Image: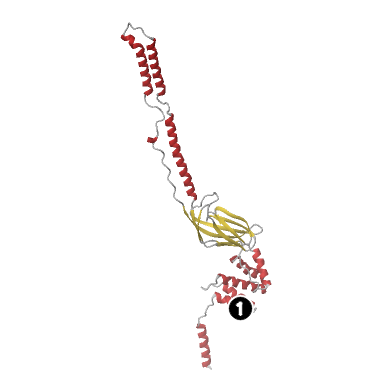
């Protein structure tokens, strides 16, 4: 008898010393499904909740989590716990707004509850390309929104501090919606390099915020080089536009001296000679010629041909300058954006 008691004690001690093998989340979920299939609902609920809350390294995949939540919701429907059933289904909708319960596997009592929850849960999922290059202004960065149900959404491109860069869409969404962006801000200018947020806000029928989804966008900007401005014409290329010096004054003095000389000099040389009208006429003509030369060659008088030539030179340079400016303006708009989307984050207005 003592031997038997000793063996029993030894066996119990050995049992207590044996390590307990922890079950993985996927194993717990599978046991919950099996318990549901045989209508052992309390056991099913226990296994499924343990699977969903498991912290083991073997966490549930996306599809396994959706499956476990679906069976948990169905279990709570039959356990007559409507709040718990709706909470499980709401987690499904928030996790995957497009998910639909298979009505071949689950009866109408379950699918109808899920349908009502999906209808009343206003959320969207977004699909964006991981990395895209576009030409700012002419290219298109496109994404797809998928809604749980018909509701109003506002889609913005924001800075991390919440400053709005551009409103991309505001209105209703049914099953899905394509959003597009051309790389420009609200002022029509290409955005600068940095991090931005694609923000999608879902609204309740009463206009309250139901959920905010944010996707970080890291944007790299490539700007082409601009052309240098043409240099203005050198001063040496311009012709003088006015007469300089004393050429007009010299013409006037020479004409006066010559005219007086013709009229007076013969009388001074030959006192007995009588002045003739012809001498005075010649002297007057020479004097008039000197006055005309003075008027034409006076300092500061413009030279029309030179003024016109200089104006053409300036106009040709201005035309080339304006052309370079237009080309540079066009180049500045030929900005290339490389957009890399990050991991989305969500903020729900109400808990799960």
Looking at the rendering, which quadrant does residue 213 occupy? bottom right
Q: Residues within 10 Å of mark 1 (few under 14, many from 20)?
A: some
Q: Please indicate whether residue 20 sits to the left or right of residue 118 in the image.
A: left
Q: Residue at 43% across / 31% down in the picture?
A: 307
Please name whichever residue, 266 or 68, is drawn nearer the observer in this view of the structure.
Answer: 266
**x and y, in percent, of residue 224 in the image:** 45, 51
Identify the residue at the far top of this view. 272
Q: Label 1, on which residue?
A: 34
**x and y, in percent, of residue 352 in the image:** 61, 66
**x and y, in percent, of residue 139 in the image:** 52, 54
Please name whichever residue, 182 or 294, is drawn nearer the observer in this view of the structure.
Answer: 294
Q: Please indicate whether residue 167 sits to the left or right of residue 305 in the image.
A: right
Q: Residue at 44% across / 32% down in the picture?
A: 308
Q: How is the image coloured?
A: secondary structure
Looking at the rendering, which quadrant does residue 274 occupy? top left
Q: Residue at 49% across / 55% down in the picture?
A: 337
On screen, 310 above or below 341? above
**x and y, in percent, of residue 296 in the image:** 41, 23
């Amino acid at each position: 008898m003592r031997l038997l008691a000793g063996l029993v004690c030894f066996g119990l001690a050995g049992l207590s010393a044996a390590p307990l093998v922890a079950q993985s989340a996927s194993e717990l979920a599978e046991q919950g499904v099996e318990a549901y299939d045989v209508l052992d609902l309390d056991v099913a609920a226990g296994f499924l909740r343990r699977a969903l809350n498991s912290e083991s390294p073997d966490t549930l995949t996306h599809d396994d989590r959706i499956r476990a939540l679906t069976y948990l919701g169905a279990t709570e429907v039959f356990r007559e716990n409507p709040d718990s059933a709706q909470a499980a289904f709401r987690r499904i909708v928030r996790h995957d707004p497009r998910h639909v319960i298979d009505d071949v596997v689950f009866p109408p009592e379950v699918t109808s509850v899920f349908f009502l929850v999906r209808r009343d849960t206003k959320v969207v999922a977004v699909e964006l390309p991981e990395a895209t290059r576009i030409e700012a202004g002419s290219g298109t960065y496109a994404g797809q929104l998928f809604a749980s149900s018909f509701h109003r959404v506002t889609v913005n491109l924001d800075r991390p501090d919440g400053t709005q860069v551009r409103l991309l869409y505001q209105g209703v969404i049914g099953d899905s919606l394509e959003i597009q962006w051309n790389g420009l801000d609200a002022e029509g200018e290409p955005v600068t390099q940095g991090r931005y947020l694609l923000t999608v806000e879902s609204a309740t029928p009463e206009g309250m915020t139901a959920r905010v989804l944010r996707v970080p966008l890291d944007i790299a900007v490539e700007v082409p080089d601009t052309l240098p401005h043409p240099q203005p014409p050198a001063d040496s290329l311009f012709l003088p536009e006015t007469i300089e010096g004393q050429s007009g004054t010299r013409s006037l003095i020479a004409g006066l001296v010559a005219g007086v000389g013709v009229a007076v000099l013969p009388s001074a040389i030959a006192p007995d000679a009588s002045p003739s009208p012809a001498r005075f006429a010649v002297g007057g003509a020479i004097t008039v010629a000197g006055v005309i030369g003075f008027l034409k060659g006076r300092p500061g008088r413009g030279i029309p041909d030179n003024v016109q030539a200089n104006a053409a030179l300036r106009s040709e340079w201005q035309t080339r300058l304006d052309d370079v400016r237009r080309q540079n303006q066009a180049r500045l708009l030929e900005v290339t954006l490389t957009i890399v989307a990050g991991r989305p984050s969500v903020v729900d207005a109400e808990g799960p």
